[in-house]
Image (cartoon, rainbow, N blue to C red):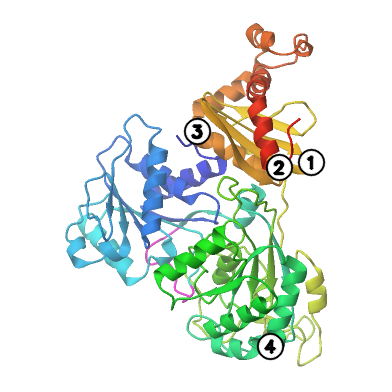
Amino acid sequence: MTILRRRQTHFVERSISALNEHSNTLAIAATGFGKTVCLSAVVNKQLHNTDKKACVLAHRDELIFQNQHTFRRFSSNDACPLSTSLINAQEKSWAGQVTFAMVPSLSRDSQLRQMPALDLLVIDEAHHAIASSYVRIVDQAKALNPNVRLYGVTASPMRGDGKGLRPLFSNIADQVKMSEVIRDGHLVPPRTFVVDVGTQEELSQIKQTTQDFDMSAVADIMDKDNINDAVVRHWQEKAGDRKTIVFCSTVNHAHHVCQHFISANINAAVIHGGLSTEERKSLLSEFDHGDLQVLLNCFVLTEGFDSQPVSCVVLLRPSSQQSTYIQCVGRGLRTVDPQRYPGVVKRDCIVLDFGTSTLLHGSLEQAVSLEGLSGGRGDAPKKACPSCKAMLPAATHSCSLCGYVWKSEKEEQDRSEASVDFVMTEVDLLNQSLFQWCDLFSDETAYLATGFDAWAGFFYLNGQWYSVGGLKKVPTKVLAVGEKLVCLAAADDWLNEHETEKAAVKSKRWLHQAATQQQLQFLSKRYRHDHSLTRYHASCLLAFKFNKRDIHSTIFREAGVQAA
């Protein structure tokens, strides 16, 4: 069972409205929003109670399996869930009403000839959609059914090569920004430090290649012993106890910086494309669950890599594309599942930028255009001098014509949250939740919500918030540890996953009904003469009472303290 968060419901409604109006649409959602659940909802609503067929495309095996699993979980709400099938290197089946297909497999001529007429073609990670392999699939789908609907979802629509998505999509249904996802507690906020080790002026003059800045030129500037020593020293000062990924300009650069970490007795390693699949898996596993603390890479971990314990990102290379910058920083913004990583608490992500990306792009919010980047590729982006209006490289900190000086790097470094414009507050999510969150004891330290089968709560203990959830005949489970907002979001998601909209409606309806006599007889005497006690508040108090022992033992165990 899965129900949508309120913002996800709006996302799905806008997507369907755009599909109905235009027969195609692109929907944009930042990492952590739950776009796979929304994708599943759109497909389900488009095909439910029909004999229509859909295909959901993705470019990697793990994505098609993830999409299929989420879709099955979502459609299990229905009496007659839609059937699914797979097309990848191992399976080749169109038997399901919804087929999840890997693009490299489906784009082959032999597979395209087997494609049936589709009513809906969905493209996950749709910024890849104008690649030739995708275009072949889209063209075949349109040839078989000129009325096929095309739905794309992505977190980052602006491609590194500057090409737009207008050839496939005529409109954008919705855009969920990263700030929304952070405010709702589904990502942790970044704290960005811009560190000038005497290289920013040189880096600002580097020319662009077809895809990015010239990384060999970056390495010539950044890969020096004194700079690598400074990188390790600043990292130790700001983030020495954090799991860290480092983005370098070249593989040699990564190896050299790694040696400086090792010399400082830091457990570090390099991952790169030249390693075998098994070698990469072994390194990622050791980093994710082992003692490896710092993982350095060159163009390997920018997309599709998520290790929840990562709470520091180091940028030793500039990025000419904002999308690449966002992807790099995004590797450290995931919240932590305490079941997978016991004892790991994460409140934010420190970003140490030794290049010019933060100064160049200034924000983690990406401007969106279906037209792509106009004017082709060329020199690094420019900015106007406020004094003489001269056009200069965007990362320049002093004007070579009139001498105007922008805010110094020392001031930038001292601003501990230089690129953060997010304000976290639990008020939004408390109001937006489909469930009513009850302040159990009116002291803002214990909140709980219930449905028909599940309950969830978040509780304050010794300076820390703990989120827990339970089901009938299922032990109480730790959902999140850390900031209040993150714990609220995790508890809300637990109810969304295990309850129904009918249960959510019940929780709101019971707010206007008095507690029943049967409820009151199970509550302490102080509540029996409380005429303001509602049926729902009483229900939450009883859920807490009946699960109190499990809640206490679970939280105390997670906190590492002895239960009273």
Name the front one of labels 2 and 1: 2
The residue that disc 1 covers is 462
Q: Residues within 10 Å of mark 1 (few under 14, many from 20)?
A: few
Identify the element where label 2 is drawn.
helix
Q: Which residue is nearer to you in this view: 277 or 175?
A: 277
What amino acid does circle 1 point to? Asn
What amino acid does circle 4 point to? Asp
Residue 136 visible? The answer is yes
x and y percentages locating residue 249 in the rendered image = 57, 82
Determine if the magenta segment contains residue 443.
Answer: no
Question: Are dots 2 and 1 in contact, CB under 8 Å?
Answer: yes
Q: Which residues are magenta?
A: 160-171
Residue 307 visible? The answer is no
Of labels 3 and 1, earlier in sequence is: 1
Give the alpha-carbon distance from disc 2 to disc 1, as whole Å.
Answer: 9 Å
Q: Which residue is nearer to you in this view: 47 or 388?
A: 47
Q: Residues within 10 Å of mark 2 (few under 14, many from 20)?
A: some
The residue that disc 3 covers is 498
The residue that disc 2 covers is 559
Name the front one of labels 3 and 4: 4
